Image: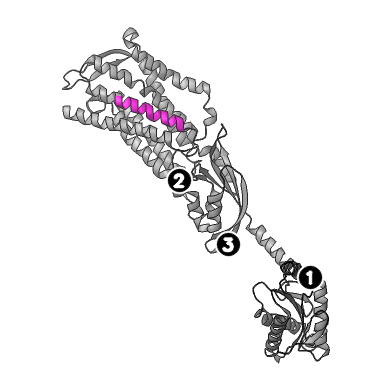
Amino acid sequence: MGTLISSYIVVVSISGVLNALLALFAYYKKTDFAGIRAFICSSFFSAVYTFGFALELSGNTMQEIGFWIKVEYLGMPFIAPCSLIMIMHFVGLERLVKKPLLALLYSVPAISALLVWTNEYHHLFYKSMVFRENAPTPLIDIVMGPWYIVQGSMTFGCMLAGMLLILWQWNRMKRVYRRQMITIFIGQFLPALGAFLYLIDRTPYGMDPVPVIMSVTSTLYFWAILSRGMLTAAPIARENLFESMRDGVLVTDRSDMLVDYNRAAAGMLEGLDSSAIGRPLAQLFLPAGKEAVDYVMNADPLLSGERELAWNISGSTWYYQVRSSPVLKKDGSVAGRMIMLIDVTERTLLQEKLQQLATVDSLTGIYNRTHFMELSRELLDEALNSLTPLSIILLDIDFFKSINDRYGHQYGDMALQHVVGVCAKHVREGDVFGRYGGEEFVMCLPHTPLEQAAAMSEQIRSDVERSPMYTVSGPVNVTASFGVVEAFRLNVSLEELLSEADHALYTSKRNGRNAVHMSSGTAITHFTP
């Protein structure tokens, strides 16, 4: 029996240490969970209770044992009310945690502690306390007083209420939180079962098993906090709102660790599941690409921001409008931030399509005249300001009307596409290539003097001539005429350059076609390689 008591004291002491560490750990843990204070208090009072019980077992006299029983009651009556308040926050009933309820829940434990310390004057808590007969070590048997029944009812009532709240919210609870709910439920059920067995005298040697059970529940709490992100947010309070939203929502703490997300976000982010709770947000954004990670890492949590990001998901590109805003506590301090992901893929692709329709010629796939003029005007301004050369090439397919009349418009379209394909092989990065109208095409060549542009035109002319268009009716020979001009004065306009290039082009047409002529602004000459 002495060896058993010694082992019991060791286990109970370990339980006290675990509860004290749990209280400290929860106190210093960064979280926006409103019920964290109740959890800290519950752990603290559990430590007081278990340490007091360990010292009670080591006592030898009635006076010594009675003193440590009084110490136990500075903690034990408050554990169940604190746990109930924590559970109410966890299941989203924090609106009910008001001063009247707190006064009711804590008044009974406070009266119990007072009555225990003054029991020898009124015997309302214990009618009597006697040493157990034939016990090899000092153990106490008690006769319950009226207030003992009140306190016991209060304790069991709080624990039962906590368990019923968890069961009540089970089906509404998001799956990611159910393991936490199971942990909390076990943390209520096991002590309640131990206390019940103790009251009906079904425990070994009539000793209270609850302090030993608390070593198990404390270990479970440690595991849930470290591996499951327990006590980071109240899930039920936001469940209906989160799960009904079409936009993805992520909630982080002050360290940018994920504490919550909704179903829509899980469909947007690869690998976002219950195991992601407690992981860095940047780690979750990593599969989406560097741009998304940079946005997360560089965003100021104190400021609201918005940005559209391309998102890579399973090899496909999606577009999300990402909005970041701080999550504030009641006192105005930052508790974390909320990231909202709005799927704008359809809108973005539509805008890109409209942009393409507004800037690209649908038949040939090169810039249309309007967009060519916009881009070329900017390049001309840059060239004039930096005193660098810029040239314009204008080309026209020879005898294009004959191709349409002889073979049909389908072959005319093929001829346009064929010439564009040949020209595209010579277009450099930075050049602007567009359809000027009908069978005419135009190129704007920055950093290119007249002679170099004329030489490039000659190369294109030669390639077009040596590259027949193959059709079902056989090969069709296509040629083109060219006019080339360089920006010849500081205040020249794009329209003037195009006019000069047009004069040079028609000089090529009048002189037999399939030729290159260049204009210096004052004279037009044939280019000879």
Name the spot of residue 129 as percent of width and height, x first.
26, 14
| Helix, strand or loop under label 2 | loop
At which x and y percent is residue 294? 54, 54
Quadrant, the N terminus:
top left
The verdict on residue 247 being magenta is no
Tell me the quarter of the image containing the C terminus. Answer: bottom right
One can see residue 469 in this view: no
Q: CA distance from mark 3 to mark 1?
A: 45 Å
Cα distance in 3D space between marks 2 and 1 = 63 Å
Callout 3 secondary element: strand
Q: Position of residue 503 (x, y in %)?
A: 83, 81
Three-letter amino acid code at disc 2?
Gly
Residue 332 placement, left or right of 146: right
Q: CA distance from mark 2 to mark 3?
A: 27 Å
Instruction: Please give the label number shown on residue 278.
Output: 2
Which residue is identified by label 3?
A: 317
Apparent side of residue 333 relative to residue 175 in the rendered image (left or right): right
Decide: few, some or many residues near mark 3? Use Cα within 10 Å; few <14, some 14-19, many ≥20. Answer: few
Decide which of tag 3 and tag 1 comes sooner along the chain. 3
What segment carries the magenta color?
35-51
Report crowding for label 1: few under 14, some 14 to 19, many 20 or more residues within 10 A (C-alpha). Answer: few
Q: Of the two numbered discs 2 and 3 on the same chain, state the one appearing first in sequence.
A: 2
Q: Main secondary structure of the magenta part?
A: helix
Residue to which mark 1 is pinned: 490
Q: What secondary structure is marked by label 1?
A: loop
